[in-house]
Amino acid sequence: MDVFNAIVQTLDSTIRLSVPLLLACLAGLYSERAGIFDIGLEGKMLVGAFAGAAAASVFHSAFLGLGMAILISVAFAMIHGFASITHRGNQIVSGVAINFIAAGSTIILGQAWFQQGGRTPALQPGERFEAITLPGADAIREVPILGPIYAELLSGHSILVYLAFLMVPFTWWVLFRTRFGLRLRAVGENPAAVDTAGISVAWLRYRALICTGMLTGIAGAYLSMVQNGGFVKDMTAGKGYIALAALIFAKWKPVNAMFACLLFGFLDALSIRLQGSPLPIIGKVPVQFMQALPYILTVILLAGFIGKAIPPRAGGVPYVKER
Amino acid sequence: MAQAAIELIGINKSFGAVRANRDINLEIARGTIHGIVGENGAGKSTLMSILYGFYQADSGEIRVGGQQASIKTPNDAIALGIGMVHQHFMLVDNFTVLENVILGAESDALLKKSIAKARSELERLEREYGLEVDPDAIIEELPVGLQQRVEILKALYRGAEILILDEPTGVLTPAEADHLFRILKQLKDQGKTVVLITHKLREIMAITDTVSVMRQGTMVATRETRKTTVEELAELMVGRRVLLRVEKGEAEAGNVKLAVKNLTVKDTRGVTMVDDISFDIRAGEIVGIAGVAGNGQSELLEAISGIRRAVSGSVMLDGKPIDLTGAADPGELRDRGLAHVPEDRHHVGLVLAFEENENSILGYHDDPRYLKGPFLNIDAIRNDAKDKIAKYDIRPADCRLKTANFSGGNQQKIVLAREMEQDPGVLIVGQPTRGVDVGAIEFIHKRLIAMRDQGKAVLVVSVELDEIRSLSDRILVMFSGRIVGERGPEATEGELGLLMAGVDHQEAAL
């Protein structure tokens, strides 16, 4: 039973750890499918995390915090759009700039406003998103196998967790079943076709980036208001980049993205679980190695195991009408 | 005369210092096929882009169906019933036919309803105009002829009454082009107006009712097609008399210079593109390889010139073998007197960001003539480039200009000058006049024949059947990686066309 409990607990933390990845990955999916590379996912998540925790703490409302996280993150996405869509700048440079601005400004503003070394004040109950207990979870907790799976694994997460997983079918539906999705995919493949069909390439790409900003905002809010009880500097810790890796691994498809993020989340959970405990045969493994494991596997997976990933064809190229 | 579908009055358009359109007046009658011819850069495409709302004219007036129209975006044009089939198809390659047709003209926010509506509408259009396409096929899996049909369907689905086609036959086989013309005639019979932009005069003669000629941004003439000739149109286009078929004497074939034997080549996907091909080229003759693009000609050229590895077979240059297994070093082949003018001058033949003089020695840059110790001898290179510019009439005559700023014809002359002036024994030329103006074509053809008359062995690969017939002393036809027939220059177009389409040569001979 111990092994079973350990598995359930590891899977439970897999879900928790993969949520920010999943939200960021879907965020990247909207922009990259529209032909805008977005290496600034990391930065947008970070400003979202900061804005969310700061607003929640000041206004004593989790939902106001979430709203502010989304607002600020979308604003940063619009900066990326202004640079790379309106002014046809290099999308990588713009994205990197956003990451730098995010890393610097969150610390400066945090220190200026709260004087806690760049942190936001610890969030009180009501300022955070609390865990939701699904109906009947407590009643069947003692049922063997199914009980723990329902009560531990499926129940007891915050609303943002359920939202993140609901975004997967929703994103699929938007992309493949709506007019907006058709146009979004088209503009990422051949913007000239969209332009000659009488649709504004710029406005379409801006709308894709608004979707991106909303999702990175939610991802940031999850980090500072669910996973953690406040904002800590650089708390995204590369999750934006891992999300990009997952996006490539998932070949820019929503359902694949979910599985990719779960895999990365699982590796993360496993490395935490196995820290310090000796492995059979190998013996004790240094903590650092276990922490590096998800990243090492990222490199291996991306290098060899995904086959040919064909990105959206117009990705990274600013649209210029040809003469 | 029927009522005008479109009137353009005093259209002007400049891009920076370049005046692409000057004071253009044009009237296109309803229910006719109207051709617009002109060399590259004459302003045809710009004019049509203005009509389609892609650009806006600096001044001038557009009238559609007698009403003054303001066309600011393609949407305005579509609303006025103007549809356009672009030279480079505006299709999303990994979408289905239906998805491409509805893109931008969806009837509903949800795709399901839009697609259902489009499906029945498409069936009607297909019946009416003979435009059969599988609505669920993925674009990139369709041959170009069908992709073009999708473009036409797109325009018709949007209710186009006036259809503009920009260089529609550039990518088509002769048979596909014929089919396209039948479709256009059918559109005309149904009362649609068709505007055909092209630089192929034969097409103009075959299908249009009226033809307008553009030169250097101005409209120089409009003629009724049946009252004009190809010669007159060519002269109007270029501004001087042009020889459409270069004069040449009998070939005096000498020794075998290049012998290809049982050559087999695969492409990067591992598909056999050249399948057990053998042929010889002798000194003093031009051998032309005809075929629809994609039947292995590119791979054949690449293998012979040492860019691509061959699977098996042999190639002998002057009786000595070329190492095909280790991808023979193109530099070594150059030293042995094999010069290559690649098909794709933009990606293989030139570095567009370089100055003209740098490109004029590319590949020969380690020749002692261009060196001063370990350094490039810049003066020698520039003087050499100036000589070539004078000899090949490359314009503008500025060896310091960035190569990208030359027109297609002049870029091709830069490559030809570089390769021909090395005095090679064997010259291999892929698509000698792709994207090149009528005037420059004449020049290039004359140079190639001059090479032949100097006793060089010349191999020409071209998808332009006219060019092959006018240049070659012997014509080989490639289909599906094999040589399916050899003919003399007197072979008819129909005969070669059948071979190119893969029809068995017994049948073709009948």
Image (cartoon, helix red, strand yellow):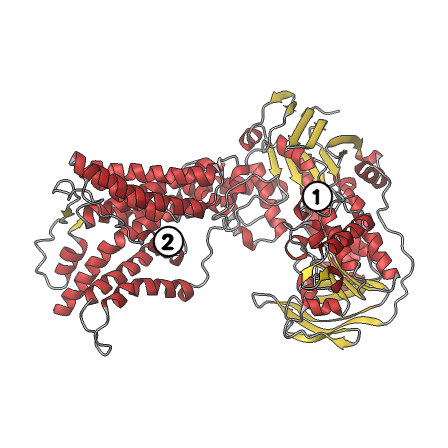
Q: Is residue A198 left or right of residue B399?
A: left
Q: Is residue B55 above or below residue B406?
A: above
Secondary structure under tag 2 reads: helix
Q: Quadrant of the C terminus of chain B?
A: bottom right
Q: Residues within 10 Å of mark 2 (few under 14, many from 20)?
A: many
Location of residue B376 in the rendering, given as x and y in whole percent from the top left corner = 69, 59
Residue that numbered label 2 is attached to = A244
Residue depth check, mark 2 versus mark 1: number of the one nearer the observer: 2
Q: Is residue A111 left or right of residue B401?
A: left
Q: Are marks 2 and 1 on the same chain?
A: no
**Amino acid at dot 2:** Leu
- The answer to which image quadrant residue B211 occupies is top right
Asked if one can make out residue B290 in the rendered structure from this viewpoint, the answer is: no
Q: Is residue A244 left or right of residue A66?
A: right
Which residue is pictured at 11% across the width and 64% down the height? A144
Which residue is pictured at 41% across the width and 43% down the height? A181
Secondary structure under tag 1 reads: helix
Q: Residues within 10 Å of mark 1 (few under 14, many from 20)?
A: some
